[in-house]
Image (spheres, grey):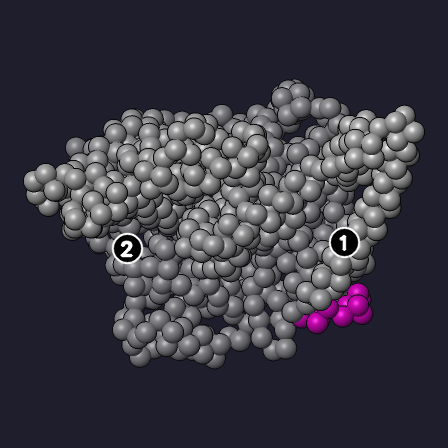
Amino acid sequence: MRRLRAFWLRVAGLLRVGRDDDFDAELESHLELHTEDEIRAGVSPEEARRQALIRLGGAEQVRQLHRERTTFPELESLLQDVRYGMRTLRRTPGFTLTAVFTLALGIGASTAIFSLVNAVLIRSLPYGDPKELVYLFTPNPHLKGVPPEVMCPSYADFFDLKQQSKSFANMSAFEQAEFTLAQQGATQRIGAARVDESFFPTLESIPELGRAIDASDNQPGREKVVVISHSLWQSMFAASPAVLGESLQLDGATYRIVGVMPPEFEYPFSSDLPYGNSHIKSTKLWIPLALPAKQKADREFGNDQVIARLEPGVTIRQAQTEMGGIMARLAPLHTTELSGGGALIESFLGVSVGPVRPLMRLLFAAVLLVLLIACGNAANLLLARASGRVRELGVRAALGAGRGRIMRQLLTESLLISVAGGAVGIALAYLFLRLLPRLDPGNIPRLNESSLDVRVLLFALSASLIASLLAGILPARSSSRLQITEVLKTHATRAHTAGHSRAQGALIIVQTAMVVVLLASAGLLIRSYINVESVNTGFSPSTLTMGIWLDPSYYQRPAAAHFKKIIETIQALPGVTVAGAVSNLPLTNSESLSFFLVEGFANQKDQLSESRSVTPGYFSAMQIPLIAGRTFTDADADASGSGTVIVNEQFAKTYFAGRNPLGAHISTDDQHKRWDAVIGVIADVRHTSLEEPSQPQIYTTGYDFDSASIAVRAVLPPATATTEIRTAVQRIDPKVVLADFHTMADLESLASARRRFQTSLLTVFAAVALLLAVVGLYGLMAYSVTRRTAELGIRMALGARRSQVLLLILKNASGLLGAGLLIGIGCAWIATRALQSFLFEVSGHDPLTIAAVCGLLALCGLAAAFVPAKRAASIDPMQALRTE
C-alpha cells in the first residue's frame, strides 16, 4: 500500500513538473520577445530584460498566478495544514494521546447511547408507517380504578366498528395465547397469537416465505394452519425452504405451516401491549382466530386486542370522536351496564415506546454532558499547548500568515484530534454494545437490536466534527489575537509569566458545574434504587416458583384432583418443605379483579378488589406472615364452596377499620348471593411492582387449576430442586408442562431491572465525568505551576515558606472548585426537577445527596490539585531564578 501511494505521488509530481516546464518555456519565450523589442529600441540587454520582467509583472508572480488558475489553492492549503498538523501532533505524543482519549470517552459514550436511542425510538419498525397504527379501547365508567387500556372492544362491537367507521383503513382483532409445542418427545410453552385475516394487512407486514393467514383460514373447521417466526424456522427446521407444508403439534393438535415471517417480526412483543400476557416475551407463531358465530355476536368483555390503521390525513382525535359516536349507538345492545363503554384510541408508538421515551431522553442528556465535559478538557489542553507555541505563531504571523490562516491551522489540528478520538470512540461504543446484553432489563423494546448502523456512524462523525469545533474554537481565537511586536521581542519562556488564563479557569468552572449535575442525578437515582431494594415485599426471596400447565384434555373435565396430586407429589420430595399454588404470582404482571361487598360496610357500587385463588400451602411456601386468624386447610380447599376467604392487611384497614375482620363476611360472586367468612389476615404483598403499595386483596382456596404458578420452599439448591420437581411431575404425567423456573429473588431483580439499568448507566457517566474533571483540574494546575515557576522561585527566594506556596496553589484550585460547585448546585436544583418521575421515596432536592456530591467532588478536586501544589512547594529557588 505504501509503495502504491508513493508511485502515484511520483506520477502526480512528474505531471506537475511537466506542466511547469511547459509554462516556464512559454514564459521564457515571451520574455525574449519583449527583451528583443527593448534592445531594438536602443536599451542595453540587461536593462531590456529588466523592462521585460516589469512589463510581464514579475516571473514568480506570473508563475504563482498560473498555479492558482490551474490548481485548487484552497485544497492545497488545507492539505498543507493537515500535513503540518500531523507532524506537530506526532512531535508531542503525550499531549496527542491525552486529548484523543479524552474526546474518545465523550464521543464513544454518546455514540453508544445514541445507538440505543436509534434502536428504541428512531429506527423504522417492521411495519408499514407505524405512526398510522393505533390501539382501540373501550373504557367503562362503571369500573372505577381499572386502567382504561384493560378494556378492549368485545367481538360484536369490533365487527360493528369495522363496518361503520370511516376513519380506519384497516382494523384487526387478535388474542395472545400460549401453546404447548411438542418437539422430538420434549414439550415447551411458546408465545403465540390468534389473529384474523386483517392482522398482517393492518400491520402491512408480509411473510418472508409462503403466505399469511387469509379469510378462508378463519372459518371454523379450517383453522389448523400456522405462520411461524423466523427464529422458530431456524431452530426447528434449520431454515429449510421446504418448511411449507410441514406440521407442528400445538396443544396436541396438528397445524400445517403456511408461512414464515421476516427475522424482525415477532409482534406482539411483551412491551407492545399495555396489559399483555407477561409470560409472552415475543410471539413465535400465529394461528387463525376462527371465531364461531356465537362468539362473534358476544358483546360482553372481550379477551381480544384491537389494532387499526388510520386513513391518511385522519387524526387520533377525529377517529376517537367517530368511535365515541358509534359506541354510544351500540350501548343499548349490551346486556349489562358493565359490558361496553366509551372510546379511547392511543397511538401504537405511544403504547410501545412511550414509557421508555423519558428514560432514553435522560440517558442522552446525561451523555451529552459527558461529551461537553470532554470537549472542555480538550479545549483546556489545546489552550495550554497554544500558549507554549506563542513564539512560533508570532513568527508565522510576522511572515505574512493572517489571523484566519492561524485559526484554520489550529482548528485543523483540533479536527485531527477529534477524528482520531471519534475512531477510538466508535471502538469503545462497539465494546459497550457487546456488554449491553448484561445490562438489558428485558422490558425496553428492541434494545437488543442496538448496533453501529449507518445512522449511528453518521452521528459519531457529526459528534467528532462538533467536538473539534467546541474544543478548538476558543484556543484558535485566543491564539490568533497576537501582538506580533510584543511576542518577537520577548523570549519564549517569558512570553507569559502568569498561570492559567481566564478562559482556562472558566472552562474548569463550567466542567465542575456539569459534573455536579451528573453526580447529583446519579446520587438521587442510587438512593432511589437502594430504597426500592429495601422495600418489604411481604414474601421470601428464596422461594422457588414455576409455571405449570396441564394437558388440554383436562380443560374439558375437573382437573382439581389431578392438580392436587401434583402438588402433593412435589411436597413429598426429599428436601421440599412445603409447596402451594396461586393463580396470579406476585411480580409477574398478571392480575385478577373481583366485584365484592363487605358486611357492615358502606359499600359503593361496582367495588373492585384484587383476587387470588391459592392452595393451602401457598402462604407457607412464600413465607407470607399471618397477621391474625388462620390460613387455609385441605378441608377448606376440598369442600366445594367452603365459604372461607383470607384478606390482606390493606383490605382489613380499608374495609374493617375499627372492627375485627375475623368472622366478618364478604361476598365475591357475581350476584352476591353467597357470603364467605374471613378466617385470616395476611401481611401486605407487593404484587404489581416493587414501587407500588399493596392494594386490598381477597384470597380464596381450591385446586381447580388448569394453569397456575407453584411456589416451593426447599432446603435444596434451586437447580437441584428444579431437576427433582421436573422429574417427579413428568413421572406422574409426561404431558404436564413446567416452565419459568425462578426464585422470588429473580423476580424481584427483574422487577427492578429497568431502574438498575438507568441507575447503572447514569452512574457510569457521572464517574467518567468526574474522572475527566479531575484530570482537567490536575492538568490545569500542573500547567499553572509550570508557567509560574519563575514567580514561585522569586517568592521563595524572598522568604515565602513551602507551606505558603502549597496553600497558594490549593487556594487557586479551591477558588475554581468553589465557583463551579456554587453554579453546579444551582443547575442541579433545576435539572433534578426533571428526575422526579424517576425517583422513589427521595426528593429531587435531597440535601444529603447534594452535600455528598459536593464533598466528593471537592475532595477529588483538591486531591488532584495537591500533586502539582506539592511539586510547586519543592521548587529550588536558585534553579528557578537561573532559568531567567
Q: Which residue is found at the position 61% from the left and 37% from the top?
A: 348
Residue 172 visible to an observer of this rendering: no
**Label 2 vs 1, first from the N-terminus:** 1
Q: Secondary structure at mark 1?
A: helix
The residue singled out by tag 1 in the image is: 13
> What type is the residue that disc 1 sits on?
Gly
Q: Which residues are magenta?
A: 236-245
> What type is the residue that disc 2 sits on?
Phe
- In percent of width and height, residue 700 lies at 35, 50
* Residue 491 shown left or right of residue 99 in the figure: left
Residue 7 visible to an observer of this rendering: yes
* Residue 307 shown left or right of residue 750 in the figure: right
| Label 1: few (<14), some (14–19) or many (≥20) C-alpha neighbours in 10 Å | few
> In the picture, which quadrant includes the N terminus?
bottom right
Please tell me which residue lies in front, 442 or 575.
442
Q: Which residue is found at the position 26% from the left and 34% from the top?
A: 816
Please tell me which residue lies in front, 826 or 478.
478
Residue 539 numbered mark, or none: 2
